[in-house]
Amino acid sequence: MMPFRLMRACIDPTCTIDVFDDGEIKRDWTYIDDVIDAFINALEQQHGYEIINIGCGNPIKLSTFIEHIEHLSGKHISKRSMKSHKTEPSITYCDNSKARKLLNFAPKTNIYEGLEKTWNWFRQEYNADDDYC
């Protein structure tokens, strides 16, 4: 969801993104194809009702994430800095050790490749030409 909102902000000058704690919060971003592969493996291997975390396990600062999208798009994203809510964790990430063990899962797409693929899809899907975005 977040990549879509950020990419939309690249092509819509009226869109402003709320950035908490100056983008210092860290999140675990996982490319959708890697998540789908893990789901397919889970269905094929049938581990019953086992709870398995799927993710990269490598948290990245939101500011780094935004900077990379700005680099890909060649556009500045309008941001509004906000203080995060006291219950908002400063860092979240996935422990994917069970997925590695049970599903032989390892993300294949790093964050930068995933964002580039997503940006290319977004531009095509939303007919965002070079003059507009």
Image: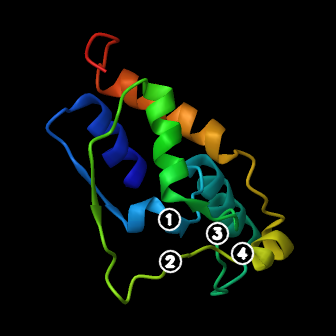
Above or below, comparing residue 29 to residue 75 in the picture: below
Residue under label 2, please give it. 90
Above or below, comparing residue 39 to residue 69 in the picture: below
Which residue lies at the image location 54% right of the left edge and 66% below the top edge? 27
**Direction from residue 116 to residue 76 in the image, left or right:** left
Q: Distance between the residues labelled 1 and 4?
A: 39 Å
Which residue is at the front of the view, 68 or 3? 68
Pinpoint residue 85: horizontal percent, then vertical percent.
Answer: 31, 82
Residue 54 has which mark? 3
Q: Which amino acid does label 3 sit on?
A: Ile
Residue under label 4, please give it. 46
**Direction from residue 89 to residue 45 in the image, left or right:** right
Which residue lies at the image location 53% right of the left edge and 39% below the top edge? 68
- Image quadrant assignment for residue 51: bottom right
Q: Are marks 3 and 2 in contact (CB under 8 Å)?
A: no
State which mark lies toward you, 4 or 2.
2
Q: Distance between the residues labelled 4 and 2?
A: 35 Å
Q: Which numbered disc, 2 or 1, marks the residue that appears first in the sequence?
A: 1
Residue under label 1, please give it. 24
Which element carries disc 3, helix, strand or loop?
Answer: loop
Q: Which amino acid does label 1 sit on?
A: Glu
State which mark lies toward you, 1 or 4.
1
Pinpoint residue 60: horizontal percent, then vertical percent.
Answer: 60, 59
**Direction from residue 90 to residue 105 in the image, left or right:** right
